Amino acid sequence: MLKASELEIITLSENTSTGRGLIAEWGISVLISAGGRSFILDGGAGDSVAYNVDTLGLDLAPVEAVVLSHGHSDHTGGLPALLRRIPRGEVEIVAHPAVWEEKCSRNRTTGAVRYAGIPYRREELERIGARFTLTAGPHWLTDDIVASGEEPMTTEFEAVADNLLVRRNGEYVPDDMADDQSVFIKTDAGLVVVLGCAHRGIVNILRYAQELTGVQPVHAVIGGTHLAPASEDQVKRTVDALEEIGVRHLGVSHCTGLPVAARLSREFGDRFFFNNAGTRLRFPL
């Protein structure tokens, strides 16, 4: 099992940044380095990823694969610039097949529907080095790091947001976000779970992580929780479940929302931190 001391996680892009010189942009991208191997979850929304990589002086040559948490533009828009920073010729992109669906979202106020999916054709990305591995199941990147694949929904209080749609056969239908996935890392300190947006529910995801990996202690959870639009009941039950699971460190990003993040900060105290662009985590925390 991976030694926690061999793990480092750097957030390349997020809604906010840690300090001067870095760009904040809606979306997320996270660099995971473990035992001499490197992977990235998500490509962010645009130019911020490549800009921040350059500003931080990071070498992406060791990056073996990019995992896409789902097919929304704020997680895929920065892929071209990111691919050009990885001097491998070809880079594996691990994603669920549904990542290429015509994803849309409905404005809750106006009712207007806009395209929200990957802003590039697959062929465009392949021309600059992307090599897609599309699978609904788990994809093990190493013996200890896995892209989760489709995450089962088992809780009664978590659901995909009802304003997320997909266009099929000319009609807009609810998007069940089957492509939602995360990265699970087995360490001797416990599980480290890196989330994109957690559209299928953070508690669903953590319970699946425990089941898939066989590791019960959850050392850290990092990334987007999609609790910004959640009801008070869902937030309360999520907090209770996270305590029951025994999450030791919680670093939220992106779609959590400041009011919920503030609540989580109060509930978790020094176990909580904001995970921003430029945050560099060395384990164990």
Image (tube, grey):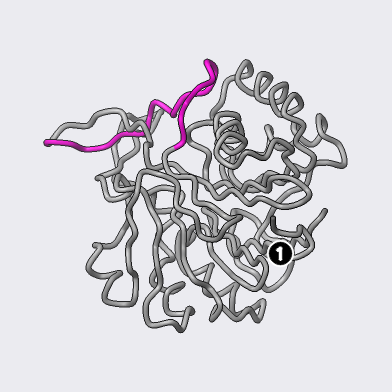
Relative placement, left or right, of 5 versus 73 is: right
154 part of magenta stretch: yes
Residue 263 location (% of width, % of height): 75, 30
Work out which residue is located at the far left of the displayed protein and give it. 169
35 part of magenta stretch: no
Residue 207 location (% of width, % of height): 60, 31
Q: Front-most of 56 and 90?
A: 90
Residue, x 74% and y 45% (percent of image)? 190
Q: Which residues are magenta?
A: 151-169
Residue, x 59% and y 42% (percent of image)? 213
Residue 177 location (% of width, % of height): 38, 36
Relative placement, left or right, of 149 versus 20 is: left
Label 1, residues with CA under 10 Å away: few <14, some 14-19, many ≥20:
some
Please determine whether, in this image, residue 80 is positioned above or below residue 155: below
Residue 200 location (% of width, % of height): 48, 32
Q: Front-most of 250 and 226?
A: 250
Q: How many marks?
A: 1
Please determine whether, in this image, residue 168 is positioned above or below residue 132: above
Q: Front-most of 145 and 65?
A: 145
Residue, x 30% and y 28% (percent of image)? 174
The amino acid sitting under disc 1 is: Glu
Magenta segment main secondary structure = loop
Quadrant where the N terminus sits is: bottom right
Work out which residue is located at the far right of the displayed protein and give it. 270
Please determine whether, in this image, residue 228 is positioned above or below residue 8: above
Please determine whether, in this image, residue 213 is positioned above or below residue 203: below
Residue, x 46% and y 49% (percent of image)? 69
Q: Which residue is mark 1?
A: 8
Relative placement, left or right, of 280 versus 84 is: right
**Local secondary structure at mark 1:** strand
